[in-house]
Amino acid sequence: MSTEELREEQQFVSGLYARLDALREEAESAVQSSLAQVGNGLQARLERDVMVAEQSGVLAALDAGENGLCFGRLEFQDGRDHHIGRIGIRASDVERTPLVIDWRAEVARPFYLATGHTPMGLRRRRHLTTEGREVTALHDEILDLTDTTRTGHEAADADEVLLAALDSARTGRMHDIVQTIQAEQDRIIRAPHRGVLVVEGGPGTGKTVVALHRAAFLLYAHRELLAKRAVLVVGPNPAFLGYIGEVLPALGETGVLLATLGELFPGVTATGTDSAAAAEVKGRAEMADVLARALRDRQQLPEPGAPLIIEHDDGDLILDWEIAYEARAAAREADLPHNLARPTFAFHVIDALTRQLAERIGHDPYGGPNFLGPDDIAQLGKGVAVSAEVHAALEELWPTLTPERFVTDYLAEPVHLSDEDAALVRRAPGAPWTSADVPLLDEAAELLGQDDSAERARAEAERQRAVAYAQGVLDVSYASRTYEFEDKDDEDAEVLLAHDIIDAERMAERQEEADHRSAAERAAADRTWAFGHIIVDEAQELSAMAWRLLMRRCPTRSMTLVGDPAQTAEAGGVGSWQDILGPYVEDRWEYARLGVNYRTPAEIMDVAAEVPRAAGVVGFQPPSSVRSTGVRPWARRVDDLAAAVADAVALAAPDVGRLAVIAPRELHESLAGKLPDVTPGASPDLTRPVVLIDPRQAKGLEFDTVLVVEPALYGTSDLYVALTRATQRLGILYAGVLPPALSAFA
Ligand SMILES: Nc1ncnc2c1ncn2[C@@H]1O[C@H](COP(=O)(O)OP(=O)(O)OP(=O)(O)O)[C@@H](O)[C@H]1O
């Protein structure tokens, strides 16, 4: 092994870290001095906020570069030589020479794609392994087969770096894979397709991690747009979001909102749970129509012959079926959401009641024309319009509704459903919201509409004011430019003025951004926010109603959907991708498949694959495991389940890494009593050495060792999920029977 090569790389990497430190210091002091700037004027605040926001972003990216700053090197046949890293860094020289290239840059692609067969111009590819700031190993691959020079670091097995990553102990948090992205994954991460991309693959094929890297890539390639519009990542449960939460920050990416479906209606926290059958009914596509019909039911008429009698200072008003019918027809004709159509309804009713009053008061008993002139009638109309009694009547016939109130009322009395379905979803007012309610609330919000015209007018006036001010700032900056620049008369002057690079609108926008929260925070609080890109993990689980919600959040339909139909647990999950996507994008979506399992060793995958196979899951194709450990899974029948689990945990609990006991919820209490330090519940702490979770919570997660308890109590997909969570060892403990698919163990 050539220590000289290692020494040289160490020298280079040390220099790189020195540059990183210097850049960090610069950014930090820029933030500090901007924050320290005083001055209350709008201009001072504007400049300070823009500066702080920019430098804070730079700082976050630089911080993210600390771990594994540089992990690769590409030597091209034409003599080009680039180091590849987590972020791009330039030297401080005048040319600002690139020292290390961001892994997402086009020039870095051969690092992931080149093979001996297609070297993409490469002579040699080097993997640098680092611990902290120290280079500990090099692995070289010679891609130009005619090249006979050797470094002494040529790997006997080119997959050594990958296998080392896969074998490493788990921490309870997902890590990025920039150092070992595989070619099939790279193609998905950088797919040029801007619309809907569906990524399918079995357990452990990297769907989640690839989707997150795609988000990072898109944020890099389309930063202008995406950083402003934010990226939404939807995951199945809070534990999963906690598990993946560090991947994007580790890649220097902010501007991403991680949420479960239950969190996507601002102001509502879904803490309740539905039965599987109730969730299935709530998720059906027909619920959109059912809610629309239920809302029309709320637009009522008095019974014919039984008008509403409204007390009024100038005499009782009679609001009968005809008046209400005409008003309702006019309001419905406007084809506006319910709350926005209400003024039309109110206008027609008030108009009719005013005419009624005028006819009565100004009536000429001798048959002559009405005594009242237009001014008198207008005066009467005003009286009617401000009458609290009239408003109460309008509210009775065409109530102003919030989504919460409408859905609460609906679920208390579910109409337009079969008796059986209605019984499933019926719920007393005041019961907590569930995840399956969130798409109903969103649908209701669409049907109801929100009268935000006053709010919008205010916002527009504010924007105009900010644009005008920003223009003023730019004019001042232009007028005060130094003569030196003017004298130069050099169109390509190196130093640009604010005027050259920013216009007033953009500057005002920036101020708006800096003044308020980050795009992700604003998006989280805004139901009508249009995200720049949406990533959906475990996409196979979402109901038709959930898809309606997500599509509303992404009018551009720029989405990455990852899932595995064989892992579908929810009865409401939609069958085929075409069924899901057809209504929104017809057939304009792309499909990619990942076929290699990077998590589960072959020994475990063989056992797990029997489960969908035995259940006859249509189209089931197990992924092929990239490694085998030689350790066979085991199963044991025991009498005292809790004691046996505790013993097995004590025996298997690793010094490093994580162990999960996956057990049906009803067994948690008895098991937790014997497992010290576990925190079961809705949000288990996955960074503990031992974790107790139920099969649903296990979705998307992984552990070094997994103990599956009482597998006969699981449904097919839950069992398949549970059995495919281990990266090293799998044990099964049961007191009852084994499910038929695992009968080989009996
Ligand atoms: N190229 C890679 N290099 C290193 N590790 C990888 C690579 N690809 C995937 N992995 C690892 O494999 C494991 C499984 O990945 P991931 O969780 O994304 O799979 P998945 O397809 O979403 O699985 P599931 O459907 O079972 O939830 C993770 O630990 C991930 O980091």
Image (cartoon, rainbow, N blue to C red):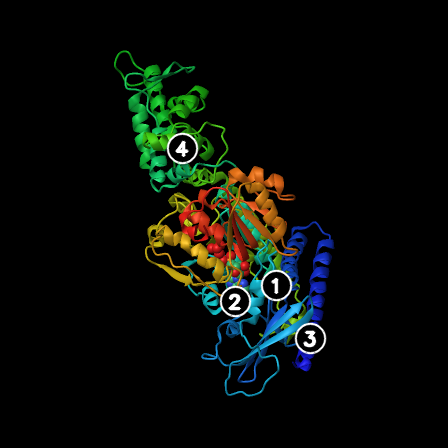
Q: Which residue is mark 3?
A: 10
Q: Distance from label 3 to label 2 (Cα)?
A: 23 Å
Q: Is disc 2 placed on a helix, strand or loop? A: loop
Asked whether 344 or 41 is in front, the reply is: 344
**In the image, which is nearer the foreground, mark 1 or mark 2?**
2
Dot 1 or dot 2: first in sequence order is: 2
Q: Amino acid at mark 3?
A: Gln
Q: Distance from label 1 to label 4 (Cα)?
A: 59 Å
Q: Amino acid at mark 1?
A: Ala
Q: Is residue 98 something one can see in this rendering?
A: yes
Q: Which residue is mark 1?
A: 498
Q: Amino acid at mark 2?
A: Ile
Q: Position of residue 2 (x, y in %)?
A: 66, 82
Disc 2 under 8 Å from ligand 1? The reply is yes
Question: Image height check: is 620 above or below 397?
Answer: below
Q: Is residue 64 left or right of residue 413?
A: right
Q: Which residue is mark 2?
A: 181
Q: Distance from label 1 to label 3 (Cα)?
A: 41 Å
Q: Distance from label 4 to label 2 (Cα)?
A: 45 Å
Dot 4 or dot 2: first in sequence order is: 2
